[in-house]
């Protein structure tokens, strides 16, 4: 029998670690949602694009603000915005408050995407609630809010 290395033991032990489980759950939800959105006629949408949609204000948002909110570089955010603009989901226009800046706004196609995504997210959450039994999901939701709200400042 071969002994496992200490690194392998840590990796195995970490499979039940809270952060890893939460990340895997987020990925599972995102994969289900993206798969259904592709089937609904949004074939160019990928998981990373959610960083744009999730951080976009109704009246539009500057790319630098989107990047800050998503915790990513401005260059990476600009690449995502360019992909979404090419696919017709967002439009980039000069900021009326500052001509040197630009605002990223949803197009009608982008608005439809957000409506479709909201509906699918609700469906996926309902399916997860059925699998866990709703009281467990509500307890999980409350527990996560507590962890987030009481997290020490960074």
Image (tube, rainbow, N blue to C red):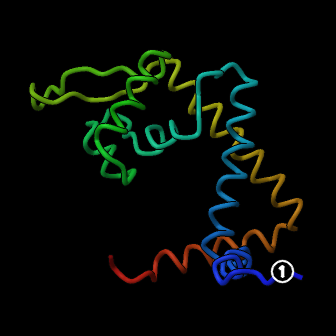
In the visual, does 117 lie left or right of 154? Answer: right
Point 66% across, 84% down: residue = 6
- Name the residue at the front extreme: 1
Quarter of the image containing the C terminus? bottom left
In the visual, does 32 lie left or right of 152? Answer: right
| Numbered circles on residues, count | 1
Provide residue 9's location: percent of width, then percent of height: 71, 82
Quarter of the image containing the N terminus? bottom right
Q: Is residue 147 above or below residue 64?
A: below
In the visual, does 8 lie left or right of 92? Answer: right
The answer to which image quadrant residue 55 occupies is top left
Point 79% across, 84% down: residue = 3
Q: Is residue 144 above or below residue 107?
A: below
Of helix, strand and loop, which one carries label 1? Answer: loop
Which class describes the residues within 10 Å of circle 1: few (<14), some (14-19), or many (20+)?
Answer: few
Pointer 1 residue? 2
Point 33% across, 32% down: residue = 78
Q: Depth check: 93 or 75 in front?
A: 75
Q: Depth check: 71 or 136 in front?
A: 71
Provide residue 21's location: percent of width, then percent of height: 69, 69
Provide residue 4's location: percent of width, then percent of height: 76, 81
Point 38% across, 30% down: residue = 79
The answer to which image quadrant residue 2 occupies is bottom right
Provide residue 112's location: percent of width, then percent of height: 57, 24
């Amino acid at each position: 029998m071969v002994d496992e290395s200490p690194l392998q033991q840590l990796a195995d032990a970490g499979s039940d670690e809270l952060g890893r489980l939460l990340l895997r759950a987020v990925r599972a939800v995102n994969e289900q949602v993206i798969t259904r959105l592709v089937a609904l006629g949004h074939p160019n949408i990928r998981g990373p694009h959610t960083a744009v949609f999730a951080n976009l204000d109704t009246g539009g948002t500057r790319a630098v603000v989107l990047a800050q909110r998503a915790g990513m570089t401005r260059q990476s955010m600009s690449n995502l915005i360019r992909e979404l603009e090419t696919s017709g989901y967002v439009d980039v226009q000069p900021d009326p408050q500052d001509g040197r800046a630009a605002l990223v706004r949803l197009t009608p196609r982008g608005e439809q995407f957000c409506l479709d995504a909201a509906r699918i997210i609700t469906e996926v959450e309902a399916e997860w609630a059925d699998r866990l039994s709703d009281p467990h999901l509500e307890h999980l939701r409350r527990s996560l809010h507590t962890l987030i709200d009481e997290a020490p400042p960074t």
